[in-house]
Structures are given as structure tokens and as C-alpha cells.
Amino acid sequence: MTRSESTTPVDFYLADGLLTADERAVRGRVRTFAEEHLRPAAREAWEREAFPRHLLPELAKLGIAGGAVRGHGCPGLSPMAAGLAMQELARVDSSFATFFAVSGGLVPVTLASCGSEEQQARWLPRLAAVEAIGAFALTEPEHGSDASHLATRATRDGDEYVLDGSKRWIGNATVCDVAIVWARVEDGVGGFLVEPPAAGFIATAIEGKMAQRGAPQAEIRLEGSRVPAANRLPRGGFGAVAEVLGVARHSAAWHALGEAIACYAISRDYALCREQFGKPLAAFQLVQAKLVRMLGEITKSQLLTIQLGRLLERGEATPGMTALAKLSTTAMAREVAATAREILGGNGILQDHEVMRHLCDLEAVYTYEGTFDINTLIVGREITGIGAFA
């Protein structure tokens, strides 16, 4: 038996009743795209380390790029609808979901929060129409969690800034039309819009990944790369960076939830069909216990992410809330994927069943937008008032 074709929703606590009709409609059309267009391309993209760019016209038709951003052609989705869209993409292909999380989410959010009206008018319509691809360049080879000590620098030279330094693990950098590059400036940290192929901007694909192999991730070298002063984002500083990363953590929580739902559904259906000792695996108490534990953890994460979405709508979510959702949901998904692999036995390592791909891909989701430990300390700081790191 190969991958489950079941369309039965994983909604044990009837959480659909907490969603609006519009939110369910967004989820429905993304689910259709994911099943009809993304699923046929996902396996080959993962195996070949190739980004399925041919899917972008169909992605554009969904009207979800830009997420919760309003104006300049962006759809102004509710945080919940944006999260559900991410869930459905990740349920089928984590790599493509990560591409979209950056170009269709993090980059538009940053422009809306930190960009000038002119910058927004130039880039947001193109990003929303998937006519342009965006990248977000913050992480460096020596500064991941320690982003407050960026080494990349931007030096003013007349009407331009000169950027020097390097970035690593930058999603979409090899395929982007605009990259938001964060660099140290005279008064802290600033963001700059760099438009490849810009001189001195060299993006090299990171190869040999064992997670999210279909996502284009790269190392960037900035060697005297000049950008107009008008390309500097008016709003900068680590407060601005932290704000947009909070939105990204919300997205990552839904991402992990989508992968967990996929693994649970695959293993449940496999247990119902696979027979051993004259009866289906689902008839064994130990297998039932695993399925129940998986469902319980998924259900808790569903309710957590839905409540976080509502808090974001009302402007009541705190950094600790988004950090807690990201750390707990990604940890849950890792465990669910590993348990699903157990239920499938030896077949669990085959691409045909997809569980092993999810298990590998979740290692990336578990790490980016703040590791488990860093997000734990963000929550710890919020509940104690004591910062454990600078």
C-alpha cells in the first residue's frame, strides 16, 4: 500500500467550528492546489534538490501571497487564514511551504511594517501576484540565534550604501528578485533592498541538505555591493526584526501542524490496511495507543494555533505567545512524525509513504525562526521578567 489518499479531516475536537466561512474557503482552495499540483511535483523536487518553479502561476491564482498584509494588491487575509494556507502547503510539501513562507509571507510583512510607501508600491503588488520572489537575509555563518551581533555592514557613500559581509541559510536567495538584507549601520541595524543580479551580491546554493531539499537555500557573499540610499528601509533596529520574526513563528507553528496532520493520517490509514498476525495493525493495543497519543498532541496544537490566530487579529499576541506556539508545535510534529515512522515499520523509510520526508523536513522547521532553546528562553523572559541572553 502506498501513501493514503484519505481526505478525512483530522479534527477530533470539531475545531472547524471555530473558523469563519472565508477561512475555510482559503484552506479549501489551497488544499486543492496542494493535492492537484504540488503533490505530483514534491517527490521529484525533494530527490533532485530542485525547486518546482513551474508551479508559481498556479500558486498566484490562489490569492494568498502577501498573507495578512493589506493594500498594494495583497489579500489582507486573517492571521488564521494565512496559517491555514501554510498548513495545507506543508501537509503536502514542506520545501514549497518554506519557499512560500518567505516570499509570500515574511518579505511582504517586512515591507508593510518597515518599508516606505514607495518601496511598498514597487514590490508588494509583484510579490502578491507571484511575479517577483523575495528573500529575507538575516542569518550569518557565525550568527544564527545570536543575530544581535551581525557582522555584515552597510557604509554610507554619498547617495549609496556599500554592503560587505556574508549571510547563510537564506531561503530563495538564488531565485529572488529582491532580498531584504539586514546589516549593521551607524545607528544600529538597518534593512536594505538588494535586487539581484546586483554587483557584489553572490548567492551560492547550499547543496547536500537532508531536509527541505526542494527549497532553494543559499549562502550570500556581499563584496562591496552598492545599493541606492533610497533602498534602505525607513524602519530598522532589532525591535523591527523581532516583530516580523514573531509573525514568522506563527507561520512556522502552522507549518509544523500541517506536517504532523499528514503523518498521522498516513499512519492511521496504513494501520487500518496493513495486516500482521491475521489482523490489521490498528487492532493492536500498542498501535492504538500511539495513534491516540499522536491525535491528542495534534488536537492540542490545533487549538493553540487557532487561539494564537485570534489573539493576533486583536493585536493581543505577545512575543512569548508566538514563541511558545512555535517551540511546542514543532516539537510535537517531530514526535508525531517519528511515531508514524514506527507504525509503518520498514515501509516507513520509503518515499512512497512520505513519512520519512516529513520527518527529515521537520528538522529544518524545528530549527529556523528561532531554535527550540531560544524560543524557550523568549517565553521564560516573558514569564519571569529575567532575560537569560542578550
Image: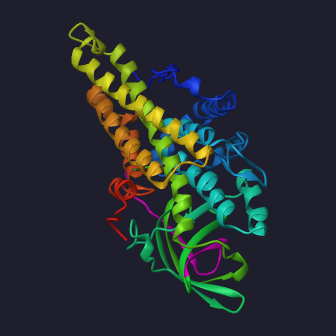
Residue 125 in the image: state x and y as whole percent: 77, 56
Residue 177 magenta-drawn?
no
Judging depth in this view, the residue of 347 and 188 nearest the camera is: 188
Query: Which quarter of the rendered picture does the N terminus lie within?
Result: top left
81 or 142, which is in the foreground? 81
Q: Is residue 171 visible?
A: no
Q: What residue lies at 53% left-to-right and 67% top-to-bottom?
A: 239
Place of residue 346 in the rendered image (x, y in percent of width and height, measured from the top left): 26, 30
Q: Residue at x 44, y 63 (%)?
A: 206
Q: In which quarter of the image is residue 19?
A: top right
Q: Position of residue 181 (x, y in %)?
A: 57, 72
Q: Give the range drawn in magenta.
A: 188-210
Residue that appears at 20% across and 10% down: 277
**Front residue (pair 275, 371):** 371
Most distant residue in the top direction: 278
Residue occupying the far bottom of the picture: 158
- Image quadrant in which the C terminus is located: bottom left
378 relative to 200 in the view: left or right: left
In this view, 229 is above or below 312:
below
| Residue 332 appears in view | yes
Image quadrant of residue 232? Answer: bottom right
The location of residue 80, given as percent across then percent down, is: 59, 39
Q: Which quadrant of the figure has residue 115?
A: bottom right
Q: Is residue 212 above or below residue 204?
A: above
